[in-house]
C-alpha cells in the first residue's frame, strides 16, 4: 500500500495551504489597480523597514534567490520605486533606496493591509489571534529546524561519502 497524504488526512496542512492561497488571491485583487504584485509590494515593504540594504540582504529577507531578486529590483528601478547606489565601503555592491514615488505608493497602500487584516480576522477574538500567531510561529520554527537538520545531515553524508556514488543514491532513496 502506498502511504500518501490526501487532503482529508492532513487537514492542518490543507487549511494552511487554502488560507495562504486565498490571502494571495485577495492581495492580488487589491493590488491590481496599482499595477503591483505581492512580491513587489513585499520588496518595497522590506526596503521601507531596512533602507540601504543590498540585493543579497533583500533576497534573504524575502526568502528568495538572489537572481530572482535581481530581476525584481530591475523592475522596481524601471518603475521608479528603487534607486541603486554604489556601496561606499564595497565597490562591488550596491545599496537599495526607496524613491519618493515608492514612499507615496506605500502610504497609499497602507489601508489595503489594514483592511485585509481586519476583514480576515473579524470573527476572531484577540486571544484567538494570539493563539493562532503563537501556534503558526511554533510550526514555522519546527519546519525550519527540520529543514536545517536535513540540509546539514545531507551535506555531511554526501561530503563524507562523495567518492562512492551508491552512497548518494542510497541517501536520495532514504529521504
Image (cartoon, grey):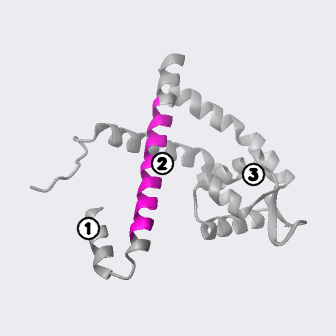
Is residue 124 a member of the stretch shown in magenta?
Answer: no
Instruction: Classify 25 as above or below 134.
Output: below
Where is residue 14? Give x, y as percent.
33, 42
Q: Nearer the viewer, residue 141 or 106?
A: 141
Where is residue 26? Give x, y as percent.
52, 43
Q: Earlier in the sequence, mark 1 or mark 2?
A: 2
Quadrant into which the C terminus falls: bottom left
Q: Which residues are magenta?
A: 135-157
Q: Nearer the viewer, residue 115 or 145?
A: 145
Instruction: Classify 43 as above or below 154.
Output: above
**Residue mark closest to the camera, 3 vs 1:** 1
Identify the main secondary structure in magenta: helix
- Locate residue 106: give its quadrant: top right
Where is residue 29? Give x, y as percent.
55, 47
Q: As drawn, is 9 to the left or to the right of 163?
A: left
Q: Which residue is mark 1?
A: 173
Amino acid at each position: 500500500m502506498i502511504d500518501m497524504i490526501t487532503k482529508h488526512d492532513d487537514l492542518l496542512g490543507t487549511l494552511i495551504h487554502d488560507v495562504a492561497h486565498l490571502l494571495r488571491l485577495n492581495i492580488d485583487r487589491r493590488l491590481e489597480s496599482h499595477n503591483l504584485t505581492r512580491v513587489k509590494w513585499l520588496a518595497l515593504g522590506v526596503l521601507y523597514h531596512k533602507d540601504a540594504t543590498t540585493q543579497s540582504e533583500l533576497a534573504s529577507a524575502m526568502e528568495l534567490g538572489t537572481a530572482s531578486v535581481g530581476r525584481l529590483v530591475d523592475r522596481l528601478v524601471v518603475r521608479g520605486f528603487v534607486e541603486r547606489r554604489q556601496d561606499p565601503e564595497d565597490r562591488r555592491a550596491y545599496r537599495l533606496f526607496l524613491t519618493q514615488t515608492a514612499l507615496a505608493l506605500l502610504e497609499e497602500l497602507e489601508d489595503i493591509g489594514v483592511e485585509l487584516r481586519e476583514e480576515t480576522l473579524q470573527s476572531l477574538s484577540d486571544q484567538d489571534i494570539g493563539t493562532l500567531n503563537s501556534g503558526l510561529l511554533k510550526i514555522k520554527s519546527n519546519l525550519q529546524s527540520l529543514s536545517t537538520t536535513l540540509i546539514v545531515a545531507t551535506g555531511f553524508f554526501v561530503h563524507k561519502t562523495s567518492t562512492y556514488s551508491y552512497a548518494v543514491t542510497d541517501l536520495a532513496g532514504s529521504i
